Image: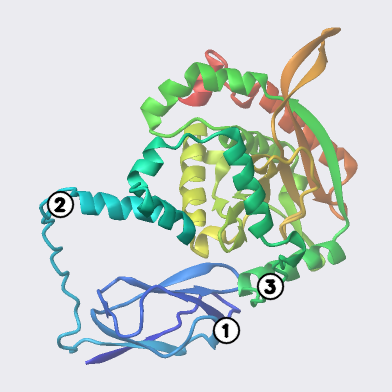
Amino acid sequence: MVTEIKVPSPGESINRVQLSRWLVNDGDWVEKDQDIAEIDSEKATLNIASPVSGQITIRVQEGETVPVGEVICSVNETAVGVKKNKQPLPKNENPPAEEKTDTTLQKATKAALHATPLARKMMEAENISEHDFLQSKRVSARDVKAYLDDSKQLSPKKENVVADRSVERKKLSPLRLKLSERLVAVKNETAMLTTFNEVDMSAIQSMRSKYGVAFQEKYGITLGIMGFFTMAATRSLMAFPQVNSMIEGDELISFNYTDIGMAVSAPKGLVVPVIRDTHLLTLAGMEAKIKELAGKAKENKITLEEMQGGTFTITNGGVFGSMLSTPILNPPQSAILGMHNIINRPVAIDGKVEIRPMMYLALSYDHRIIDGRESVGFLVSVKKFLEEPWLMLLDTADPEKQLLGL
């Protein structure tokens, strides 16, 4: 029986995909549920698995663009004698060690000694072996200088070296093409502005140092900083609902919930998995979800459902060393928060100069629906929550431990 495997639909409005890579070779034996190919769509990279076991016949080559529903390969379930059995490795039989005879030693020495025919003739006349010559010769500075002079004369001139000036061309993936189209549309169709502020990360670093071990022992995950930023953004979005809104046609849509996207640099390009209902999550719940989605994105295992929607986005250029940037909107959202690297800088604290771990924050927003008051107020709110994390809780009996869920 032969089973045909077709291109699945990656989502609505997508009718063509690119077969980016085969994970098996033509004629190989594949197992049921084994990943056999990767396809690139406008939204994500997806794996195709074989529904049956058998011998595969590939019909579409890597790099080809094919319509959804097209047959890309077939699997013959009745193939006989194809399945590759692992051949036992040959036994590690150590051959008996050869005795180092004088002849063997002479051959090795002769290979190491580069002598001219005249020099060898003189050595034979005086009954001097190569081994004796190497053992007795003392290398002087004059010998080294003579060797270097000879090497310079024999080495090719630098002007004869040809530099590699070749170029490589390859098609952009559908994901990269769609990303380019969306980014250009943002610049052309929105009134995007960016406002900046800075945040003192001392309080968060102190909490991570103080409770990091206990947090990991209880929840099995590292206490990072993305959870703090997600929670601070969530609380600030609830206080400034205009930032948690978007334009659709001639209507303004405001959300009573917060779904925050996390921009992740994946092998195939930038993807934005979404954390749902962040207003209902604890800090530990946010950290667990961030770790899960980031890991899946970097392994190209993120699903379309996990990237759909989102009311706000956070991007962290600081992981690459960025000090300051103007993040671009993630349409149709109206705002995005940019994080940057943490640098110890001198700042004025109560009239005195102190060295503090500082980070620049950037909020890009669509000025069509978000005014300066809302944008600046939102960013100041995020700054305040990060510098005083206990303010994110209503019950402040033991705010630090309550925030961490310890």
**In this view, which residue lies farthest toward the front?**
125
Q: Distance between the Cα atoms at labels 1 and 3?
A: 15 Å
Q: Which residue is mark 1?
A: 15
Decide: is 398 above or below 143: above
Element under disc 2: loop
Which badge, 1 or 3, is on the more N-terminal residue? 1
Q: Nearer the viewer, mark 2 or mark 3?
A: 2
Residue type highlighted by circle 3: Leu
Residue at 60% across, 32% down: 228
Q: Which residue is mark 3?
A: 177
Q: Position of residue 381 (x, y in %)?
A: 75, 31
Q: Distance between the Cα atoms at labels 2 and 3?
A: 64 Å
Residue 98: mark: 2
Q: Nearer the viewer, mark 1 or mark 3?
A: 3
Residue type highlighted by circle 1: Asn
Quadrant of the image containing the N terminus: bottom left
Number of residues whose C-alpha sits closer than 10 Å to that of mark 1, classed few (under 14), some (14–19) or many (20 or more): some
Residue type highlighted by circle 2: Glu
